[in-house]
Image (cartoon, rainbow, N blue to C red):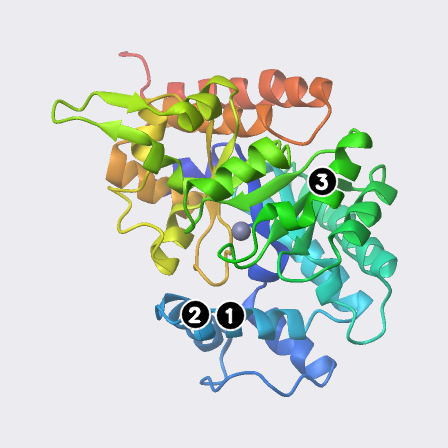
Amino acid sequence: MDEELIRRAPKALLHDHLDGGLRPQTVIELADEYGYANLPQYDGTADGLGRWFAEAADSGSLPRYLETFEHTVGVMQHADALFRVAAECAEDLAADGVVYAESRYAPEQHLEAGLSLDEVVEAVDAGFREGERRAAAAGNRIQVGTLLTAMRHAARSSEIAELAVRHRDRGVSGFDIAGAEAGYPPTRHLDAFEYLRRENFHFTIHAGEAFGLPSIWEALQWCGADRLGHGNTIMDDILVDADGKATLGRLAAYVRDKRIPLEMCPTSNLQTGAARSYESHPIGLLRELHFRVTVNTDNRLMSSTSMTREFTELHKAHGYTLEDMQWFTINALKSAFLAFDQRLELINEHVKPAYERLRAEASPPPA
Ligand SMILES: [Zn+2]
């Protein structure tokens, strides 16, 4: 498999932050347009600013990592800016071969210039619909839904959950909580999750990225999460003996038996220290053990990544083939917050035939 083949293969993305995926040039132009004066020192070029983001995120320093989001969120305070960022996000993902994506962001972080929560959601949704149209005009099919995120350290999760349900038929397909795991267990937001369950709504929870098993256990057994953002630390409940035989603890067995989707983000994990290398990333063992694993980007700007890059690195580290890519993609689509008939249509009418064509192309029958 080469990078070009990986790019053309259809992919599905469940875990991507809208404020973590801006084009560097757009950050520069929006800062200029809206008078955002706090951009960091960079060489004045979009490439230079892109490098600053990647280096700050790579630095191993949490304050520098968090600073990157101050700047992207800083230029996303107006309806036109949100519209533009969302439209470009859909275009960029479509050009990367993504056919279905769920993009997440925290509406409460975009109110500084006076927008209401509903206005934020409307602007982002309009941007995604525009991006889908532009992508279609360029010959790329993509469908984008949004997940509304509440911040773990804040106290607005019930309000954001209600906002998500209010917009459920207008582009919002789910809910999430994000932010520091340690000290902010998901049960702090139990009211929001109980409300969402009563509304028959879907949600995922960032859990098990850096913090241990209790975070995963609370997210599933107290809060009722449909999926886990990251979920790496489920490895703490899997014992591998000297012969390579794996024994699953109760929670790991539950996660696998119930087919709980894990939204894994390898490159992001390398930056935050949640994993040491692509080779040793939990995705390798979890794929072998047939957990419901999916591949995701998390923050494309900060990690200078794309779905193509994630799969290229995994191909190099684990020898994954088109067959594996199809498996990951179908896992993601099965786990999508999308109506069952639409999931089936995407899998059977689009993804499987495309992979069949690509496999035939990659290894043509002997003449
Ligand atoms: Zn994330």
Disc 2 element: helix
The residue wearing badge 1 is 66
Which residue lies at the image location 57% right of the left edge and 39% below the top edge? 219
235 and 55: which is toward the camera = 235
Name the side, left or right, on which 69 lies relative to 87: left
Total marks in image = 3
Q: Amino acid at mark 3?
A: Phe
Residue 99 in percent (x, y) is at 60, 35
Name the side, left or right, on which 67 lies relative to 174: left
Look at discs 3 and 2 and give the one toward the viewer.
3
Q: Amino acid at mark 2?
A: Leu
Which residue lies at the image location 32% right of the left edge and 50% below the top edge? 275
Q: Amino acid at mark 1?
A: Leu
Disc 1 element: helix
Look at discs 1 and 3 and give the one toward the viewer.
3
Badge 1, how many Cα within 10 Å: few under 14, some, many 20+?
A: few
The residue wearing badge 2 is 62
Disc 3 element: helix
* Separation of residues labelled 1 and 3 (CA atoms): 26 Å
Residue 204 in percent (x, y) is at 62, 39
The residue wearing badge 3 is 193
Which residue in the rendered view is the most extreme toward the left?
242
